Amino acid sequence: MPKIAFVNGSYQTINKPSIKIEDRGFQFADGVYEVIALTNGVLIDLNFHLDRLNRSLREINIEWPTAKEAFNAICAEVIRRNRLVHGSLYIQITRGVSARDFSYPKGLKPSLIIYGRHSQENQNLKKIECIKVITTQDIRWDRCDIKSISLLASVLSKAKAKNKLAQEAWFLNKDGFITEGASSNAWIVREPNIIQTHPTNSSILSGITRLRIIRLAEEQAIKVIEKPFSLSEAKKAKEAFLTSSTSFVQPIIDIDGTQISNGKIGLTTKKLLNSYLKFMG
Ligand code: PDD
């Protein structure tokens, strides 16, 4: 496990963090974050992640805590100090520290935390794990496009999934459509080489892996439909999978107890997984 984190201006051991009790991230979840995959020491789609972080910050009126060059240098230093080769980088920016009050004062200095996590092996060699998902009501707020650190609905939904021996929870909106997963984007394969996912709007996070998969699909003449799908459509799908920076492309073989794709990874999912692994290098 990496031991060194960047916390508000200095490199500290991860077990002795100096987070202030009145950091607004801690008190109000008043902040945003990014998780970026790292393969062979390279941050995957770093610029897309930084663009999304920039947007999340802008949407909640938090300034960048550092200049861009300094920020990149800190990321590189965290990777270097922890000898990170394969894994992920976690970045969190909160509004900063002030006496607990719902309204925030002007001119607060944002807090910045960056640390890394090792993965056991090169992701490309990882065994493909087919997973089960359950569905649960989408009880989140109306701005799921902001990568907010307020993740309680996702935490509770994951616990519900775990209780049912599933690995992910898919959120169902009031109209019976699946928006996304608790920590991933949701996809179905309608027909071989035709994939479908919820369009980007305030109901979902615009996943960076989702974006990359759309590009890789188009290169392989796989048709992408960005349109909500219902639970019954999902259960009837030829294949299903999820995407995220930590799971990449993960096959789904069971939705609420209904078996999908004969319980194994389907051809279209496999094609996309292989092209994503190849892209990561
Ligand atoms: N979660 N939707 C939600 C709600 C997410 O939390 C995530 C990622 C995604 C996929 O986004 P991306 O492809 O950019 O990772 C979609 C990360 C991995 C997390 O919170 O750990």
Image (tube, rainbow, N blue to C red):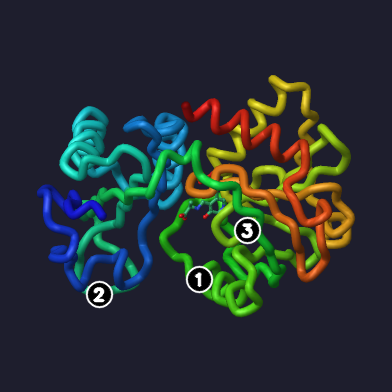
Q: Which mark is residue 155?
A: 1
What is the spatial separation of the Cα atoms under label 2 and label 1, in whole angstroms? 24 Å
Residue 93 visible in rendering:
yes
Q: Residues within 10 Å of mark 1 (few under 14, many from 20)?
A: some
Left or right: 41 in relation to 156: left
Where in the figure is residue 26, as x and y percent of width and height? 30, 69
Residue at numbered disc 2: 100
Give the amino acid type for the residue marked by disc 3 in the picture: Gly
Q: Residue 93, relative to residue 27: is it above or below?
A: above
Quick check: marks 3 and 1 in contact, CB under 8 Å?
no
Where in the figure is residue 191, as x and y percent of width and height? 88, 39
Left or right: 42 in relation to 147: left
Q: Secondary structure at mark 3?
A: strand
Q: Earlier in the sequence, mark 2 or mark 1?
A: 2
Q: Secondary structure at mark 2?
A: loop
Residue at numbered disc 3: 181
What is the spatial separation of the Cα atoms under label 2 and label 3, in whole angstroms? 32 Å
Viewer-nearest of labels 2 and 3?
3
Q: Residue at x 56, y 39 (%)?
A: 209
What is the spatial separation of the Cα atoms under label 3 and label 1, in whole angstroms? 11 Å
Residue 107 visible in rendering:
no
Quick check: marks 2 and 1 in contact, CB under 8 Å?
no
Is label 3 within 8 A of ligand 1 (CB to nearest ligand atom)? Answer: yes
Quick check: marks 2 and 3 in contact, CB under 8 Å?
no
Q: Nearer the viewer, residue 31 or 83?
A: 83
